[in-house]
Image: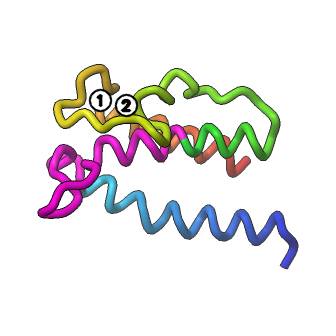
Amino acid sequence: MQTRELLKSALEQSYMLVMPLLEDLKTASLVPATGKGGNHAHWILGHLVCSEGQFRTMMRGVDNPVEHLRPLFAGGSTVDPETHGYPSYEELLGQLVKLRAETME
C-alpha cells in the first residue's frame, strides 16, 4: 500500500469511529470526560477542528481556515466549562465534516 492510500485509509477509519461518538455527545457536550474531570466534548470537538485545519496546512501547504479558533481549542488552551466565546457544538461539528471532506479530496 502506498503512503497516500495508507493515510487515506487511516483518516477514513478514524472519522468513522469518532463521528458517531461526537453525534451522540450533542446532548451532553459539557459533561467532563471522567468523574475526575477532563475536557468536555465541546472542547474536544473544537480541538479536532483545529487539528484538522492544521493537518491540511501541513499536508497541502494551504492556510488554516480555522486559525481563529486556535486560542480557544489548540494545545495549551484552557478549557472553559461554560463555553464562553465558543462556536456552537453544531457549528463545530459542521466545520469538522466540511474540513474532513476537503482533506479527503
Residue 72, how many percent across, how many down? 40, 29
- In which quadrant will I find the N terminus? bottom right
Q: Distance between the residues labelled 2 and 1?
A: 5 Å
Name the residue nearer the viewer: 8 or 50: 50
Residue 28, how many percent across, how many down? 15, 49
In the rendered view, tell whether residue 53 sits above or below residue 104. above
Mark 2: which secondary structure?
helix
Mark 2 in CB contact with mark 1 (< 8 angstroms): yes
User: Dot 1: within a 10 Å radius of its alpha carbon, few (fewer than 14), some, or many (20 or more) residues?
Assistant: few
Mark linked to residue 26: none
In the rendered view, tell whether residue 56 sits above or below residue 6. above
Q: Give the range drawn in magenta.
A: 25-50
Identity of the amino acid at label 2?
Glu
Q: Is residue 83 magenta?
A: no
Residue 44, how many percent across, how many down? 37, 48
Q: Which residue is drawn at 72% across and 26% down?
A: 63
- Look at mark 1 in the image and give the residue it sits on: 88
Q: Which residue is drawn at 69% across and 51% down?
A: 104
- Look at mark 2 in the image and give the residue it sits on: 91
Q: Does the magenta stretch include residue 39?
A: yes
Identity of the amino acid at label 1?
Ser
Mark 1: which secondary structure?
loop
Q: Which residue is drawn at 29% across and 42% down?
A: 42
Residue 59, how many percent across, how many down? 78, 46
